Amino acid sequence: MTRHLGLPVVDLGRLDGGGGSTSDIARAIRSACETAGFFYLDGHGVDARIIADAFEANRRFHALPMARKQAVASNRWHRGYLGFGDAKLKSSARYAPARQANRLESFFVRHEVEEDDPDFRSGKPLQGPNQWPDDAFFKEAVSAYDKALRRLGMRLLPVLSLAIGEEAGFLARHFAPPSTALRLNHYPPAEPTPEDDVFGSHPHTDYGFLTLLAQDAIGGLEIETTDGSWHPVPCREGAFVVNIGDIFARWTNDVFNSTRHRVVTPAGGRDRYSIAYFFDPNLDTFIECLPAFQGGEARYQPIRFVDYFAERLDANYSRRDAEPDGGSDAS
Ligand SMILES: O=C(O)CCC(=O)C(=O)O
Ligand SMILES: [Fe+2]
């Protein structure tokens, strides 16, 4: 029997005349990141209507006939539809490869890159156009969600800067602009007699900086504690589940935990929907162990975010057509 951990709750609303100071909130975030690596975010200011519409768009898209979804199949900039079986964890430095593909389908929207952008013209990885299904409501709802979550990510930067012991403006220079990925996930119900090693999403850590997750009430997300046991992260009404990814952990010399998590396939014949928003640094930024965390020595070499990211995508994921894909934890 898994036990619900009772993750810390951080209330950003306390900053808006709610009697909290930025440094109180930074302390709470630091403590959460040094332990669970996950917390619930309340008082985030994202309108409930925007979240509900994005879930409606998620359901509507995944209910389309497969041919219409395949018409916007993930392009080489990792934007678009990733079908069942397209995201199989191939290998990982830290964990055994998965034997079965993840039982989910997703739609990815990343930061907008116009076709006249010099990055696009020069063929830089991940810098290309989004694709949209032929549905005006979908584009409007998903764009509104993307914009709101990007704003929230930017709003968190001063408090996260304080949480890593830097001045409030420190992180902003690494996010000018950020790279982002919005992933609409659909997990179909479990088979009556599932095979071994089948998950909605296999145990993984997220690649990037910060993940902000909205989930429905079905449940299935679980996180691993240091003793190797798994614990559910139930839906908390109105809150985002926030976790830090590998690049944030790397910045802190692994003082902050990028915690392994997974999604078990939904029981009871029900479908599960979630929306993950991966909020990551600018592709050109250098990630190098922060002085405050160097202690003995830095565990990782400095790396340009785009190089790190492209390497993670290429090393860890395969698609049926052998092109690297957006992967379960790709952000
Ligand atoms: O759907 C979820 O609850 C989690 C998804 C996830 O871990 C991911 O997309 O990286
Ligand atoms: Fe994840």
Image (cartoon, rainbow, N blue to C red):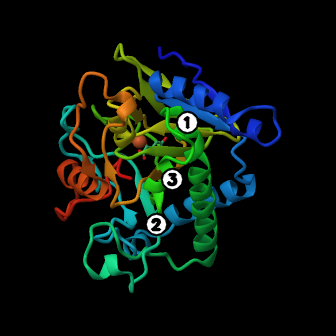
Q: Earlier in the sequence, mark 3 or mark 2?
A: 2
Q: Determine if residue 164 is in view.
A: yes
Mark 1, other Cα within 10 Å: few <14 / some 14–19 / many ≥20: many
Q: Earlier in the sequence, mark 3 or mark 1?
A: 1
Q: Is residue 159 above or below residue 86?
A: above
Identify the amino acid type marked 1: Leu
Identify the amino acid type marked 2: His
The image quadrant where one finds ligand 1 is top left
**Marks 3 and 2, how far apart in space?**
17 Å
Disc 2 marks which residue?
Answer: 111
Left or right of 179 on screen, residue 3: right
- Give the percent coordinates (x, y) of residue 131: 43, 75
Of residues 2 and 223, the one drawn nearer to the viewer in this rendering:
223
Q: Residue at x 20, y 39 (%)?
A: 92
Identify the amino acid type marked 3: Ala
Give residue 294's quadrant in the image. top left
Disc 1 marks which residue?
Answer: 162
- Give the percent coordinates (x, y) of residue 287: 32, 47
